[in-house]
Structure formats: structure tokens, C-alpha cells
Image (cartoon, rainbow, N blue to C red):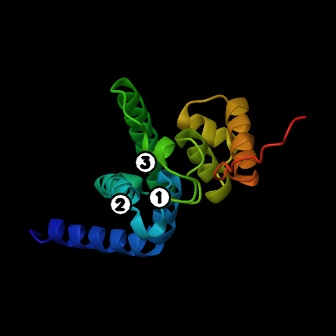
Amino acid sequence: MRDRPAVQQRRRAREFEAYVAGAAGRLLHAATLLTGEVPEHNVRARRLLTAALSRTYAEWERLRGEDPYDHTRQELAARFARGAWLYHHWGALRGRVLPWAARRAGSGGVLERLSPRERLVLVLRLYEGVAEEQTAAQIGLPVERVHAICLRAIATMCSKPPGPTAARPRVATP
């Protein structure tokens, strides 16, 4: 009977490995979209996903009957939101230029032009297919605000990105 905890741990590890094998690719893509990084250089997204998966593994036994993907996605979004808020406010307090503000257009990921909150709402709503009500509850905003943020993010992504300012030709005045 002493082997029972060891057997349970091995079973738990196998179940979690199977879950990660199936879900890690999509979750990493979502994390990469959230961070605004390019897929080839998504160090922050990988750290974010590792932390979210660690939390899911720690709570694996308590997730019986719940969707582990949903739990990991919620943890990923919460960690991103906390990290973006802290990074944004501490950077602003210390007078630093924030990475998403300092990047030139085209040097980062697909959603680099969006603010962290806009990326979070857009990824949850469009990429992950989370309902507005659930998104609002998860990030602590009214449903109307989530709707407005999503529309603004879509409009930003559909608009032409700002290019380098070309020198306008001077018109000779008589």
C-alpha cells in the first residue's frame, strides 16, 4: 500500500503530460499574441505559459470535472494582465520608455500596435472565442467596456499601420 501515492503521482504526471502535449501549442500561440512578440523570439510568452502551466499542474487534482484548458487560459490571461499592469506602471513611474511604445512598426508581433489591454481583450474574444460576459468578468471590466475595447482593437488592426513619415514636397508660393 506504500506504492499508492507513487502510482497516483505517476498517473497525475501522465495525465498532465498528455494535456500539455495537446494544448501547449495553442496556448503558446495565445501567449505570443498577448505579449506582442514574434513567434521566433517569444521569450516572455514562454515564461508566461510556463508559469500558467505550473499553476495548472499544482491544482491538477482539484480540477476534476473542470476544463484544464480553460483554467490554464484564465491563469495565462491573469498573469499577463498583472504583469502588463505592473510593467506599465512601474516603467512609467521610473520614466522608462515602454517596449510596446518604443518599437518601430513591423519589428514585433502581429498585435504589437495594440495596448496590452486591447491585446488581452482581442485574444480572448477573437482567438480564444470567449464570450464578452466571461471576458468582462475575468478582467474585471463592464461588458460595455470590453465591447468598446474589442471594437477599437479591431479598428486599429484593420487600419493602415503608420509608416515612416515622408518629407512632403514643398509647393512654391508666388
Q: Amino acid at mark 2?
A: Val
Residue 43 circle label: 2
Q: Position of residue 74 (x, y in %)?
A: 48, 48
Q: Residue at x 75, y 42 (%)?
A: 151
Image quadrant in which the N terminus is located: bottom left
| Count of number-bearing discs | 3
Q: Secondary structure at mark 1?
A: loop
Task: Tell me whether the residue at label 3 lies in contact with that at label 1, contact meaning CB atoms closer than 8 angstroms.
Answer: no
Q: Nearer the viewer, mark 3 or mark 2?
A: 2
Crowding around mark 3 (Cα neighbors within 10 Å: few <14, some 14 to 19, many 20+) is many
Q: Secondary structure at mark 2?
A: helix
Q: Residue at x 62, y 36 (%)?
A: 136
Q: Position of residue 18 (x, y in %)?
A: 39, 75
Between marks 2 and 1, how big is the CA–CA gap?
A: 8 Å
Q: Can residue 67 be seen at all in this image of the molecule? A: no
Between marks 3 and 1, how big is the CA–CA gap?
A: 19 Å
Residue 37 circle label: 1
The extreme right residue here reads 174
Crowding around mark 2 (Cα neighbors within 10 Å: few <14, some 14 to 19, many 20+) is some
Q: Nearer the viewer, mark 3 or mark 1?
A: 1
Q: Nearer the viewer, residue 62 or 115?
A: 115
Between marks 3 and 2, how big is the CA–CA gap?
A: 18 Å
Task: Tell me whether the residue at label 2 lies in contact with that at label 1, contact meaning CB atoms closer than 8 angstroms.
Answer: yes
Residue 75 circle label: 3
Q: Residue at x 70, y 52 (%)?
A: 157
